[in-house]
Amino acid sequence: MSEKAQRLRIGSREAVVLVAARELKVRIRSKAFLILLAITAVAAVAMPLIFHFTNLSAGPTKITVVQQDTTLAPTLEATAAQLGQKVSVSTVADHAAGVAEVQSGRSAVLAEAGPQGGIQATVKKSLSDPLKQLFQVVDQQRALSGQITRLGGDPAQVLRAVGSAQVEVTALQASDPQNGQRIAIAIVAALLLYMTLMFVGQSVAQGVVEEKSSRVVELLLATLRPWQLLAGKVLGVGILGLLQLVVPAVLGVGVGLATGAISLSLGSSVGTVAWALAWYAVGFSLYALVFAALGATVSRQEDVGGLTFPATAPLILAWVVGISVVPTNPDSTLVTWLSMVPPCAPVLMPMRIAMGVAPLWQVLLSLSLAAGFCVVLLRFAGRIYRNSVLRSGARVPLREALKAA
């Protein structure tokens, strides 16, 4: 039976599905995949839980005053409220009892009236900056009240007048109370995409080299066309990477919404995850083709890292820019333009979407450019794979691999 007849026994779709199923079945059992999946899943669950329990434990700062200084308590509470601090003031019988409260950790500080009229603070190790600011303001108020009394004025009236004086602020842009959550979600989404694309890209390249070095590819190509084998391998590893991305994302968002650590609406949270998955599909298609083509040009696993590193440079650049610029300046011109560049877009555009700063037209334009780039890349990657995958020994130069068959 001729080679052409053997290939015609299996339809193109069936061939791609068979290769994808084989790839998925083999790699889903690998220790590297299972360990990475477990780590990302645990981290995705732990982050909202830590945030939730940290908020629960972050109660008001406890201050202790001695009984003879009870007039200090309402002053501390009122001043703390003006400064936006949460404090709880309790009273003890004497100095020794207050020291015991601080030593046991039940109170952060013992506040007493000092010999010079100021506050004498007793702490276990050091006085925090917020409490230091609170005591300084109270000291200044008490000193001012003393001077006003000596001059025959009414300290309460003066303090009310001082307290009513406020700075008028005109905001050019409305503040977003959920900005911190958006930044956290953007960074987590970018990290998951970055790690997943790096992992699955390397998996594709290593799989190609493994089959080439063991000559399994020669047996497969006796029945399959090169593009069918390449497409099936990319599809199988792509589904594996999708699982690597979906599990942590669903767990993290689910736990965050259930505990209240994420206060964004369900639609906004699901939308962010959906856009991340869409960009994963685009990013994986782009990088998998590059890694598969480059992997076909070598015959040894140890040559994969050095060969594919330049291809990952845009991905690394996008991640570095994403964590250093996007959280503080998501509207940066650099970020906007890089999020339009196909190799960088799969990391940066989901971050901008999560931050709520990416207009729909920019998202669609970036998707279109990335999809068009993948189509062009498919032609060249397929040619490199076809011309190199059956050649063993020395590395196949790219110029030679790109020659039309």
Image: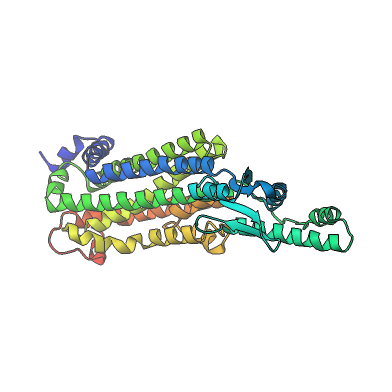
Question: In terms of depth relative to the viewer, which is nearer, 62 or 273?
Answer: 62
Q: Is residue 2 visible?
A: yes
Query: On screen, 253 above or below 363?
Result: above
Query: On screen, 253 above or below 100?
Result: above
Question: In terms of depth relative to the viewer, which is nearer, 346 or 40?
Answer: 40
For this orientation, the residue located farthest to the left is: 1
Question: In terms of depth relative to the viewer, which is nearer, 231 or 102?
Answer: 102
Q: Quadrant for the C terminus, please.
A: bottom left
Residue 168 position within the rendered picture, expressed as x and y whole percent measured from the top left: 78, 57
For this orientation, the residue located farthest to the right is: 152
Residue 376 position within the rendered picture, expressed as x and y whole percent measured from the top left: 38, 55
Indicate left or right for 317 with 59 as reference: left
Residue in the picture at 12% in, 41% down: 2
Residue in the picture at 25% in, 46% down: 32
| Count of numbered badges drawn on the protein | 0
Q: Quadrant of residue 120?
A: bottom right
Q: Quadrant for the N terminus, please.
A: top left
Name the colour scheme.
Answer: rainbow
Question: In terms of depth relative to the viewer, which is nearer, 111 or 28?
Answer: 111
Residue 160 position within the rendered picture, expressed as x and y whole percent measured from the top left: 82, 53
Q: Is residue 130 visible?
A: no
Query: On screen, 235 above or below 351?
Result: above
Residue 73 position within the rendered picture, expressed as x and y whole percent measured from the top left: 69, 47
Q: Quadrant of residue 131?
A: bottom right
